[in-house]
Image: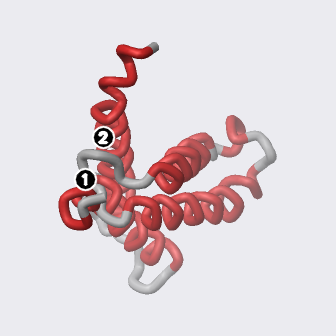
Amino acid sequence: MKPLRKIAPYTYFVFRAFLGLLFLGHGLMKFGMLGGKVSPIFTLMWYAGAIEILVGLLVTVGLFGAYAGLLGAVEMVFAYFMAHYPKGVSPYGNGGELAILYMIGFLAISAKGSGEFSLDRTIFKK
């Protein structure tokens, strides 16, 4: 296990960057990009898309990662209980697996922060 600790900062960077990019893509879809439908302005889906774009960008570049991760996790809790849970308790039956995975990923980022390869590290010298 000791040799794997050497690559931990790199694997965390890949995890954080891909999670952020995928979430950014979800937000862009709500604005008609990447094959998505345009959400009417100032609706719940429009605000969700704006949050997803903001969180996705911040997490991808590693800026204010702990706060962005917390915001993303909270949004996914709301998404799960507003859009998926009413369709049934099981995330496998209600389509909520992705919301739960995002929530857990963002909680991990919120707990660890942006990590070694991040704008937080560059700007704030943490």
Q: Residue at x 50, y 56 (%)?
A: 110
Q: Is residue 87 visible?
A: yes
Q: x and y percent of residue 42 in the render? A: 44, 86
Earlier sequence position, callout 1 versus callout 2: 2
Callout 1 touching callout 2 (CB < 8 Å): yes
Q: x and y percent of residue 105 in the render? A: 51, 45
| Residue 102, above or below 15 | below
Look at the image and tell me in which quarter the C terminus lies: bottom left
Q: Determine whether the residue tagged by mark 2 lies in a helix, strand or loop.
A: helix
Q: Residue at x 41, y 79 (%)?
A: 40
Q: How many marks?
A: 2
Q: Amino acid at mark 2?
A: Phe
> Is residue 29 rendered to the left or right of residue 83?
left
Give the residue number, with chain letter if any, for mark 2. 13
Residue lying at the far bottom of the rendered structure: 42
Dot 2, how many residues are within 10 Å of its Cα: few (below 14), some (14-19), or many (20+)? many
| Residue 31, above or below 101 | below
Q: Determine whether the residue tagged by mark 1 lies in a helix, strand or loop.
A: loop
Considering depth in this image, is 36 or 23 the residue closer to the camera? 23
> Is residue 103 rendered to the left or right of residue 35?
right
In the rendered structure, find residue 6 and report the number of the disc placed on it. Answer: none
Q: Is residue 28 visible?
A: no
Give the residue number, with chain letter if any, for mark 1. 118
Mark pair 1, 2: CA separation: 8 Å
Q: x and y percent of residue 63 in the render? A: 30, 63
Q: Residue at x 31, y 63 (%)?
A: 58
Q: x and y percent of residue 30 in the render? A: 38, 65
Q: Amino acid at mark 1?
A: Ser
Dot 1, how many residues are within 10 Å of its Cα: few (below 14), some (14-19), or many (20+)? many
Q: Residue at x 53, y 52 (%)?
A: 111
Considering depth in this image, is 50 or 73 the residue closer to the camera? 73
